[in-house]
Image: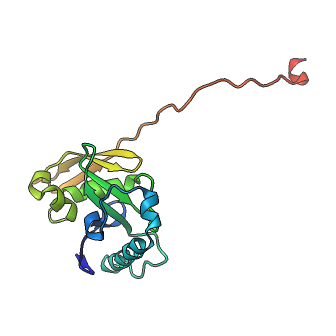
């Protein structure tokens, strides 16, 4: 779709989103969340596009809703597949929601999407691994294809936990417990 002269992709794969190339809104795509949140003129324009996307997606008037999520996309800078800024919807998220990563990875292999066009449609036709760079780091999505002609896309995210710290706590023993 094109809203107010800006090419967008409306996608609903785990989360309704409107994807917009950062350059079409005068952004590089690597701005910090604080920089984006401080640009009120940009946020108003982003909201206008979000409202148009909501109507186009059949969601009606989304003024009081958090969907669709607006997402700025740009070329990767740190070896990933693409770089994003994900909005919640009126402020830039410090990382990326799992549901957002699923939709973004799907857009990478959806012919004609602004993401596939940005990456080069033919290069992404059967992409199996997508690394999405975001302000907090990156997230990896694995894509697989099933069906007679591989027409069904399955997107998977592996989440792991890591130990942040370990330690001991010393507490005085009460008289009742000691006796």
Instruction: Report the quarter where the C terminus lies.
Output: top right
The structure's colour scheme is: rainbow
Along the horizontal axis of the image, is 97 left or right of 120?
right
Instruction: Report the quarter where the N terminus lies.
Output: bottom left
Residue visible at 45% across and 53% down? 94
Q: How many marks?
A: 0
Residue visible at 82% across and 23% down? 172
Q: Is residue 18 above or below residue 135?
A: below
Q: Quadrant of residue 28?
A: bottom left
Image position, residue 95 (x, y; %): 42, 51
Task: Depth check: give the residue in front, 72 or 96.
Answer: 72
Q: Is residue 88 visible?
A: no
Q: Is residue 72 visible?
A: yes
Image position, residue 123 (x, y; %): 11, 51
Task: Depth check: give the residue in front, 38 or 141.
Answer: 38
Q: Is residue 1 above or below residue 173?
A: below
Image position, residue 173 (x, y; %): 83, 22
Residue visible at 18% across and 60% down? 118
Residue extending farthest to the top is 179
Along the horizontal axis of the image, is 129 left or right of 52?
left
Task: Depth check: give the residue in front, 176 or 34.
Answer: 34
Q: Is residue 38 above or below residue 167?
A: below
Q: Is residue 85 above or below residue 165?
A: below
């Amino acid at each position: 779709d094109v809203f107010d002269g800006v090419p967008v992709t409306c996608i609903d794969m785990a989360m309704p989103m409107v994807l917009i190339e950062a350059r079409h809104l005068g952004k590089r795509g690597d701005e910090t969340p604080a920089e984006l949140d401080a640009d009120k003129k940009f946020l108003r324009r982003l909201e206008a596009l979000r409202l148009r996307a909501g109507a186009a997606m059949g969601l009606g008037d989304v003024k009081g809703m958090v969907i669709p999520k607006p997402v700025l996309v740009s070329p990767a800078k740190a070896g990933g597949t693409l770089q994003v800024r994900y909005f919640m919807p009126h402020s830039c998220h410090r990382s990326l929601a799992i549901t957002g990563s699923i939709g973004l990875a799907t857009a990478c292999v959806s012919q004609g999407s602004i993401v596939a066009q940005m990456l080069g449609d033919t290069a992404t036709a059967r992409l199996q691994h997508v690394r999405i760079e975001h302000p907090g780091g990156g997230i990896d999505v694995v894509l697989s294809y099933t069906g007679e002609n591989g027409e069904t896309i399955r997107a998977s995210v592996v989440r792991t936990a890591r130990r942040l710290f370990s330690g001991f706590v010393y507490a005085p023993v009460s008289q009742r417990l000691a006796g």
